Image (cartoon, rainbow, N blue to C red):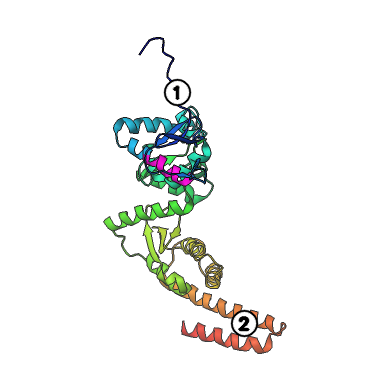
Amino acid sequence: VSRWAPPAARPVAGVYVRGIWVRKPLIEGAIMAFWSKLNVSSRDRNDVDAEECADATLAVLRDAARSEAGRAALRRLLAPLQGKKAGSSASGGGSWLLRTPRFTNRLLEAHRPFFLGALGMPAGALFVSRRTTESGDPFLKWAAAFLARRGAPLLPLEPGASKALFSEASEDELQERCVKELLAELKKAPAARTDAQQAAAKLLAFVGAESRSLRLHFSALVAVPFAHGAHVFMPATALDRGLLLRLLATLQKRLGRFDDKCVHATQAFFETLPAHGGLSLPQLDAALSRAKQVGVESRAFERRLEVGGGGGAAAAPAAAEADRLHSTD
């Protein structure tokens, strides 16, 4: 070739299918050339399907990630997605691969595990910011600290990180991970049956309905009561009124509705149980008997309201029922 020959023209940025330019690139300034997995569309054959192009682009990235050099290059190109830690922002910074957020987000949302892996994130990682680690919600704060101590993949969520790829761990996700860790620990060292466990079982039976199917666990690792799925976790503390009230509040939250029996038990506990000091199982039995009476009185009051406030005829059967319950408990 003569040294006077004109320089070869640079390829024009765009989407190429089998060597033929089809349309402007979906990534600004990029040459997106595909020899398979993509076909032209539209009547004039001058376009490509955006979803198909995204799938074809992902296939190229997956191929690149098979080699060590390719993984390193891909990680550098994706680094701005991590936010300020990477010295840039999720808008792309100096990475040509991220110049068009609309197309990038399409890829990230559809294939989140692949891109997290390409960035070196451990499988199943949860991301938390100071909003969680310093939360005013007791459970969120405890869960973040507990999982960090257990060595769970709990990673900091950096300012400016891609919202399509990194999101704050939800309360439900934290609960699910805590349940997994706690059940594994209890399997290694089952907890001995205590008065607190027996009392909690009695309370679950009193509330009844869905609560009967819940599995109750006491653990010294738990600082804040919580429920997730079929599991309820309580701190391994002595049986007292405070423990019972916390269990009632946890049950109410788990059931997700206003439960009359929980309300009746709460009133009975405040009426009959000491505010401080331990309790015995007979004391709990007496308190639950009072809770049944509270339920009878509540229903009698509601019936009196229904008949216009006249207490006479409705009050007598209610009083008789309350006396019967009291004599049989």
Toward the viewer: 139 or 69? 69
Q: Is residue 154 left or right of residue 305?
A: left
Residue 174, label in figure: none
Q: Is mark 2 on a helix, strand or loop?
A: helix
Neighbour tally class for label 2: few under 14, some 14-19, many 20 plus, Cα within 10 Å: many
Q: What stretch is highlighted in magenta?
A: 50-59
Q: In this view, does 307 lie to the left or right of 257?
A: right
Quarter placement of the N terminus:
top left
User: What x and y, as percent, mark residue 238?
Assistant: 40, 60
Q: What element carries label 1?
A: loop
User: What x and y, as percent, mark residue 273?
Assistant: 50, 68
Number of numbered labels in the structure image: 2
Amino acid tagged 2:
Ala
Q: Is the magenta stretch mostly helix, strand or loop?
A: helix
Residue 283 appears in the figure: no
Query: Could you tell me how far apart the alpha carbons at marks 2 and 1 are, in whole angstroms?
Result: 89 Å
Label 2 vs label 1, nearer the camera: 1
Query: In which quarter of the view is residue 16 placed?
Result: top left
Residue 10, label in figure: 1
Residue 300, label in figure: 2
> Which mark is first along the chain, 1 or 2?
1
User: What residue is rendered at 52% in x and 75% in y?
Assistant: 291
Q: Is residue 251 magenta?
A: no
User: What x and y, as percent, mark residue 278?
Assistant: 44, 63
